[in-house]
Image (cartoon, helix red, strand yellow):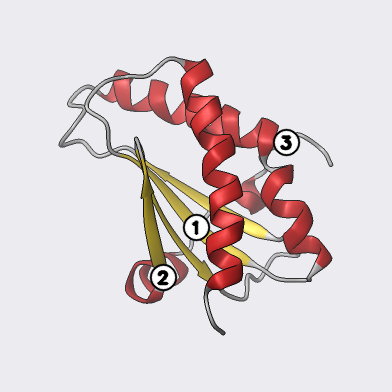
Amino acid sequence: MKQTFTKAERLCKKILITKLFREGHSFYLQPFRVTFLETVIPENISAQLLISVPKHNHKKAVDRNKIKRRVREAYRLNKGILLEPLAERQQQMAFCIAYTSKEILPSSLITEKIILLLQRLWKEHAQVPG
């Protein structure tokens, strides 16, 4: 699997984002809150991701961008954990990772948490009926 994070893999459509937050399921894994929904994505990919860092916790845009960069990189390197099982079952998913901590964690810790998050996301997705 290629280790890229293309435009098609980013969740941008407002209708899909609204549906995700209205109908999606969620769980919390320190320092992330994950909301996910199995849905049909117009592009021919298995999953689309939205990364959110609230302004409430990090006032400076520089800090929010730094966190988003770290999360994006961790996801890019480890997305096979989630995408390969989804592709095997020909399923599609939209999900959001919201960073909830008030501190900026180091990249190594964010990477560890993203790996755990992707493993748990697959388990949670498999348990959701429908």
Which structural element holds mark 2? loop
For the residues labelled 2 and 3, the Cα–Cα distance comes to 26 Å
Judge depth for marks 3 and 1 and give the one in front.
1
Disc assigned to residue 4: 3
For the residues labelled 3 and 1, the Cα–Cα distance comes to 17 Å
Mark 2 or 3, nearer chain start: 3
The residue under the point 72% across, 53% down is 83
**Residue 52 location, x and y as percent?**
36, 43
Q: Residue furthest bottom?
A: 130
Disc 2 to disc 1: CB gap under 8 Å? yes
Is residue 29 rendered to the left or right of residue 120? left
Disc assigned to residue 95: 1
Neighbours of disc 2 within 10 Å: few (<14), some (14-19), many (20+):
some
Neighbours of disc 3 within 10 Å: few (<14), some (14-19), many (20+):
few
The residue under the point 38% across, 56% down is 27
The residue under the point 26% across, 21% down is 103
**Picture quadrant of residue 88:** bottom right
Kind of residue at badge 1:
Phe
Which structural element holds mark 3? loop
85 and 47: which one is in front?
Answer: 85
Residue tagged by mark 2? 24
